[in-house]
Amino acid sequence: MARREAGLTQAALAAKAHTSQAAISAYESGRRSPSVDTLARIIDAAGAELRMRLAPIDRHDEARRRGEALLEPGALEQFTTAEHSRVDRRRRPRVAGG
């Protein structure tokens, strides 16, 4: 996102960040993850700033409760039942030839 906002190609960003275009491509596609040092260089080369902070895990419980309250009666139960059924089907061993 920072690369695109900076108007840089992968090759141009790689040159500025002292890494390879192949590495930038792998990071952007999620095939690889950069070290924090490499990530900081890439973000700096794109003209942005890396900020990190410690925060409690957000499981979005409050947003989920509000969203579920907007559902039609029985919709959440119907969805949950369908999901359990889907998971159960996936867990069953497959029979050869069947």
Image: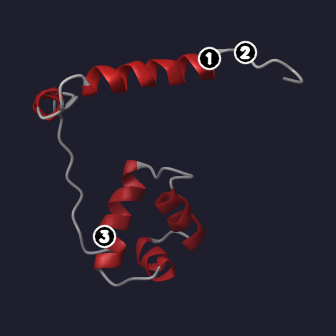
Q: Amino acid at mark 2?
A: Pro
Which residue is at 36% across, 74% downward? 3
User: Where, quadrant-wise, is the C terminus in this rendering?
Assistant: top right
Which residue is at 44% across, 24% downward? 83
Q: Check disc 1 and report its element: helix, strand or loop.
A: helix
Find the distance from the CA under tag 3 to the CA under tag 1.
41 Å
Give neighbour class at mark 3: few <14, some 14-19, many 20+ (Cα, 10 Å): some
77 lies above or below 7: above
Q: Position of residue 43 (x, y in %)?
A: 32, 65
Which residue is at 26% across, 25% downward? 76
> Which mark is first along the chain, 1 or 3?
3
Residue at the disc numbered 1: 91
Q: Check disc 2 and report its element: helix, strand or loop.
A: loop
Q: Quadrant of residue 97?
A: top right
Residue at the disc numbered 3: 2
Is 37 placed left or right of 59 in the picture? right
Along the viewing direction, whichever of 59 and 35 lies nearer the viewer: 59
Residue at the disc numbered 2: 93
Which residue is at 28% across, 77% downward? 5
Q: Quadrant of residue 92?
A: top right
Q: Amino acid at mark 1?
A: Arg
Give neighbour class at mark 1: few <14, some 14-19, many 20+ (Cα, 10 Å): few
> Which mark is first along the chain, 2 or 3?
3
Give neighbour class at mark 2: few <14, some 14-19, many 20+ (Cα, 10 Å): few
Q: Position of residue 75 (x, y in %)?
A: 26, 28
Find the distance from the CA under tag 2 to the CA under tag 1.
6 Å
68 lies above or below 95: below
User: Where, quadrant-wise, is the N terminus in this rendering?
Assistant: bottom left
Render colour scheme: secondary structure
Mark 3 and 2 residues: CB-CB less than 8 Å, in contact? no
Find the distance from the CA under tag 3 to the CA under tag 2.
45 Å
Along the viewing direction, whichever of 16 and 97 lies nearer the viewer: 97
